[in-house]
Amino acid sequence: MPKTPYATPVQVTRASLPPLEDFLSHVREIFASRQLTNQGKLVMRLEQALRDTLEVPALSLCNNGTVALQLSLRLLGLNGKKVITTPFTYVATLSSLLWEGCTPIFADIDPRTLCLDPAEVERRLAEHPDAAGILPVHVFGNACDVEALAAIARRHGLRILYDAAHAFGSTLDGRSLFDWGDAAVGSFHATKLFHTVEGGCVVTHSAQDKERLGLLRAFGHRGDEHFCLGINGKMSELHAAMGLSLLPQLPDMLAGRRQRAEMYDRELRLEASPLRRPALAPGLNWNHAYYPVIFPDHAMLMRAVAALQAENIFPRRYFYPSLTRLPYVDSPACPIADDTAERILCLPFWPDMDEALQVRIAALVRGVCRA
Ligand SMILES: *Cc1c(COP(=O)(O)O)cnc(C)c1O
């Protein structure tokens, strides 16, 4: 066991990289063609490869997940409308709503899965019958109660846009989580399980939606013909090169995550620990996008953070604070989300993480739990 802190800071994750030669072979292709962006060959190829991998009908790559959310809100006609969403998520879920002039209505989460609770959505809908859509998040790659949410949307005539930023590689009853809702958005930011350095995507279910998204993403015009208001949401060829060279590693990355999650489970001695883990949705094959642990109280979490930081290890408080508490938000409390946000911590975790490091982190956390 090391007595001195780790020389280089240990962050909550480490970006995956493809073999450099694989990346360079795609870059050489870009240099040869001189097509650098604007729906080039590599972007098209990556869109096809992701459609095949995820088995979804249509997928459009974007320059990041936040813009992909904003484009999707427009696609579904939700801009400027009331949208029910969760306060337990990364701030981008909320900021994309606000940036599109939507009024976010927070509904509380299910304390087990940490995803939007359908009963709470119903409760908020009774107070806000003019809501036009739901923006749930598959938090940490766990699955929302997609059937219950679909039933609510049908009953009330709402559109559902899933923030699936964490859900790449998670399947529910064998089907990608990207395949649910009127549209689903992925993030391919460097910190995500699969990435293109910066990037994102929108999964849609009809040729018209795919076509319209293509316009929204590229200034709303084709040649000299202008169809609608658009913005620049395009992915570059260089970013697609990263995705194309990283995608073949997906099975190894998923297997590595699973194996290291099992390692943490064992080393944390969860059965005898006050720590709790989120409960997985029934039928989920989890991508292990993160390794969250829930402490019994905030004080114990802070002691764990201090013990780890003393050894140059930096877990992240995903997601803290609860978005109901942000200075530019005026929302009634969501007691479960607000409380969970105080007590949850994501431990450093990546697919080829060193086992000795995991053993050390688990020992430090166990020490705090015993104290
Ligand atoms: C990462 C993330 C986003 C934003 O994606 P970017 O590609 O970084 O813009 C949105 N929602 C959630 C839940 C995320 O974790």
Image (tube, rainbow, N blue to C red):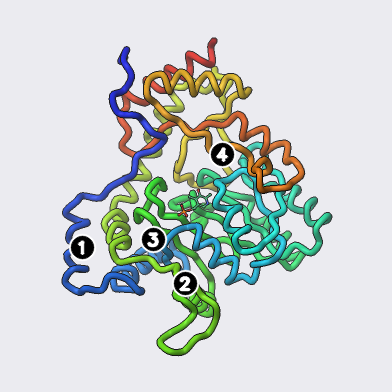
Q: Is residue 101 left or right of residue 219?
A: right
- Say which residue label 4 marks: 319
Mark found first going from the N terminus, 4 or 2: 2
What residue is shown at x 61% (from left), y 64% (from top)?
A: 100
Q: In which quadrant of the rendered image does the N terminus lie?
A: top left
Looking at the rendered image, the disc whose residue lies closer to the viewer, 1 or 3, is 1
- Residue 334 rendering spot, x and y as whole percentages: 72, 41
SS for callout 2:
helix
Amino acid type assigned to the residue bearing label 4 in the image: Phe
Looking at the rendered image, the disc whose residue lies closer to the viewer, 3 or 2, is 2
SS for callout 1:
helix
The picture quadrant where one finds residue 248 is bottom left
Amino acid type assigned to the residue bearing label 1 in the image: Val
- Residue 172 rendering spot, x and y as whole percentages: 53, 52
The Cα–Cα distance between marks 4 and 3, rounded to whole angstroms, is: 29 Å
Mark found first going from the N terminus, 4 or 1: 1
- Say which residue label 3 marks: 53
Mark found first going from the N terminus, 1 or 3: 1
SS for callout 4:
loop
- Say which residue label 2 marks: 217
What residue is shown at x 83% (from left), y 56% (from top)?
A: 126
The Cα–Cα distance between marks 3 and 2, rounded to whole angstroms, is: 23 Å
**123, above or below 301, in the image:** below
Q: Is residue 265 left or right of residue 183?
A: left
Mark found first going from the N terminus, 3 or 2: 3
The Cα–Cα distance between marks 2 and 1, rounded to whole angstroms, is: 24 Å
Disc 4 residue crowd, few under 14, some 14–19, many 20+, Cα 10 Å: many
The Cα–Cα distance between marks 4 and 2, rounded to whole angstroms, is: 29 Å
- Residue 271 rendering spot, x and y as whole percentages: 54, 21
